[in-house]
Image: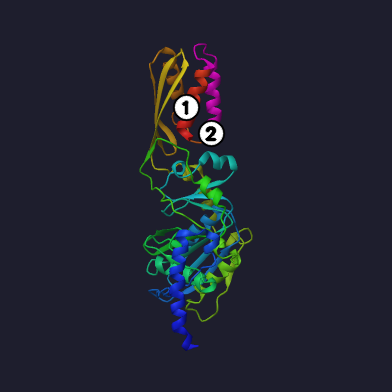
Amino acid sequence: MSFCLPYLRLYRRHLSAYTDLCQRHFHLEQIRSLKVTPALPLVRTATTKAAKHEVIVSQSTCIFENLSLEEWLFENTDFENTSYLLIWRNTETVVIGRHQNAWIEANVPLLEQKGVSIARRNSGGGTVYHDLGNINFCFLTSRERYNRKWNLNLVTEAVNDQWMLNLSVNARDNIMWNDMFKVSGTAARLKSKCAYHHFTLLLDVNLNNLQSFLQSPLLGASSRATASIPSSVINLLDVEPQLTYDNVIQCVAQRFLSFSHNSQPTSIEFLDLKKDRSRFPGLDKILEDRLDWTWIFGKTPAFTLDRHFVTHCYQSRETCLRIHCKIQDGCINTLDIQFSPLDQTLDRLTTSTNNVLLTERLSGKHLRPVFERLRQDFSEDKEVSPHLLDWFLNSLWVTLFG
């Protein structure tokens, strides 16, 4: 077989060049068959200190349970001699980073309408959409063995070797297919003695949901919260139809276990949190905190909303409205409503609205009955026409929610 190697290398170089050309001129269906193995194998970086490796696959598909399990392991495990790979997937969920603003990153009203969960994780990074077609990998180690590149390379190498995909890790620690499409983002949390690094792998995600759920309708927002960086994405199943959740996690798990420094062979543990909850004392408290509105929305960095509106429905003249509000801890902290020109009727409208809305949570579910009370109160004021009231309340709602 050795006499074939020069021809094989030459063939791969020509095939790689042809793939690049096709990427510029053909649709995905035409380049799907042009998968190539990277010219150089991914480097298997040795960990700093030998460790036993264990793999846990959570059977739960609840984002809050899985994030709580991740946090429990991080806070309650001794990683000096053992490193863990935790794998899970979730039903439809939008997950924001620790320092992000859900209202700016996602279409919160649409998510509430569709019954899709919003979760805040403890690590930094950007916003991601999860469903059952998205695999989540979390590497939990000692701080000494924390190595993002090693983790990412392990996954890309395992998948490349098994299915001859052209996956690589870019400078931002994202996994890319053909250096063009992002199939994984990355985030981490570090403490003095331990760390975890987690990232997703887009296998067969609903891309329509991803696009619509991560498109905020909010305008006029100003915030210092961490902003996500949009990227072109692709499902790996569109590249390799043989991929499944089960065969991908088996492939990656076995590669991780192959680096284990353990005299006894280690198998993959499939964890049922309902049956095995007693193994994790305190998990329910972490879960309660992760489900709390004050964590998901109340931890949002302060931001402001500023909108302008114009109408001719009041006294047959042009009336301008400016709404400026500050959201602090997820609640309406200040609300400045300015009409121009201003009269006594509009002044009453402004004062009453301020009195009602200040300190209220910025939540559609919470504010709908509040707005309904405002509507009922103002409808008794003969000076406030139905058209003016509809326009004013709609402008206020659009300012707050888009």
Q: Is residue 278 above or below residue 380?
A: below
Please state the horizontal and vertical placement of residue 309, each as a whole percent of the image: 42, 25
Q: Residue at x 48, y 23 (%)?
A: 392
Where is mark 1, residue-wise? 395
* Mark pair 2, 1: CA separation: 18 Å
Q: Residue at x 50, y 63 (%)?
A: 137
To which quarter of the image does residue 90 belong?
Answer: bottom right
Please state the horizontal and vertical placement of residue 280, each as a whole percent of the image: 55, 60
Tell me the element at label 2.
helix
Q: Residues within 10 Å of mark 1 (few under 14, many from 20)?
A: some
Residue segment shown in magenta: 365-386
Residue nearest the observer in this picture, 149 or 49: 149
Please state the horizontal and vertical placement of residue 89, each as a whole percent of the image: 56, 58
Can residue 83 be spotted in the picture? no
Q: Is residue 197 above or below residue 53?
A: above
Q: Residue at x 43, y 61 (%)?
A: 174
Residue nearest the observer in this picture, 58 or 397: 397
Q: Which mark is residue 82?
A: none
Please state the horizontal and vertical placement of residue 63, each as a whole percent of the image: 55, 53
Is residue 146 highlighted in magenta?
no
Can residue 111 be spotted in the picture? yes
Q: Residues within 10 Å of mark 2 (few under 14, many from 20)?
A: few
Residue mark closest to the camera, 2 vs 1: 1
* Label 2 or label 1, whichever comes before in sequence order: 2
What is the three-letter code of the residue carrying label 1? Ser
Total labels: the figure holds: 2
Where is mark 2, residue-wise? 366
Q: Is residue 268 above or below residue 108?
A: below
Q: How is the image coloured?
A: rainbow
Tell me the element at label 1.
helix
Is residue 380 highlighted in magenta?
yes
Residue nearest the observer in this picture, 218 or 367: 218
